[in-house]
């Protein structure tokens, strides 16, 4: 039975931190599904399709090296429901620091109570990408700053185009 893992996020934009977790997760799963959360209460800078395009563009080459199969989807309900639809038994969550751990432990507990057959696996971010957050990347890009150290080159170009109009 293949091990299917689901890594969910807003990915607005895709950062080097996301890519780091994808790289690690692909070594643990036979199939890795990247799930873009779409929530009506949030106003992303990129559409769901743009985020999907970015994920496919930057993650495919990294995952291809591992032999892991990739999948992509959007969801607007509970992440455990998205995992069930994909037959995933593992939820991947990246951790940067203790604050992330506190929040993610609560989320893992709630998800585990709702759907016990889906296990949360925490992956620590590599030291070089720990300070990166999509929120900070958006703020820097909006103010005309250079985000090339924090996102893949193609994402930096998309951010520059988005905020130069």
Image (cartoon, rainbow, N blue to C red):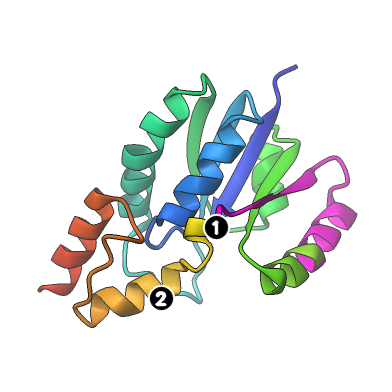
Q: What element carries label 1?
A: helix
Q: Is residue 29 above or below residue 151?
A: above
Q: How many numbered marks does the figure carry?
A: 2
- Residue located 50% across and 33% down the image: 71
Q: Can residue 40 be seen in this view?
A: yes
Q: Distance between the residues labelled 2 and 1?
A: 17 Å
Question: Closest to the observer: 117 or 127?
Answer: 127
Contact, mark 2 vs mark 1 (Cβ under 8 Å):
no
Crowd rating for badge 2 (residues with CA inside 10 Å; few <14, some 14–19, many 20+): few
- Residue placed farthest to the front in the image? 127
Span of residues in magenta: 106-126
Q: What element carries label 2?
A: helix
Q: Mark 2 points at which residue?
A: 136
Q: Mark 1 points at which residue?
A: 127
User: Quarter of the image holding residue 58?
Assistant: top left
User: Quarter of the image holding residue 137?
Assistant: bottom left
Is 61 left, or right, of 117 in this rendering?
A: left
Q: Can residue 43 be seen in this view?
A: no
- Residue located 26% across and 74% down the image: 141
């Amino acid at each position: 039975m293949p091990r299917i893992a689901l890594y969910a996020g807003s990915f607005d934009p895709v950062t080097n931190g996301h890519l780091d977790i994808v790289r690690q997760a692909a070594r643990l799963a036979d199939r890795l599904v990247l799930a873009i959360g779409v929530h009506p209460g949030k106003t992303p800078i990129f559409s769901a399709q743009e985020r999907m395009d970015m994920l496919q563009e930057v993650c495919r080459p990294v995952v291809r090296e591992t032999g892991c199969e990739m999948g992509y989807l959007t969801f607007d309900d509970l992440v455990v429901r998205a995992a069930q639809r994909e037959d995933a038994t593992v939820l991947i969550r990246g951790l940067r620091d203790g604050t992330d751990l506190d929040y993610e432990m609560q989320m893992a507990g709630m998800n585990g109570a709702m759907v016990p057959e889906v296990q949360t696996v925490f992956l620590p971010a590599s030291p070089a990408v720990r300070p990166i957050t999509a929120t900070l990347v958006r703020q820097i890009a909006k103010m005309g700053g250079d985000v090339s150290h924090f996102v893949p080159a193609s994402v930096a170009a998309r951010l520059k185009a988005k905020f130069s109009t």
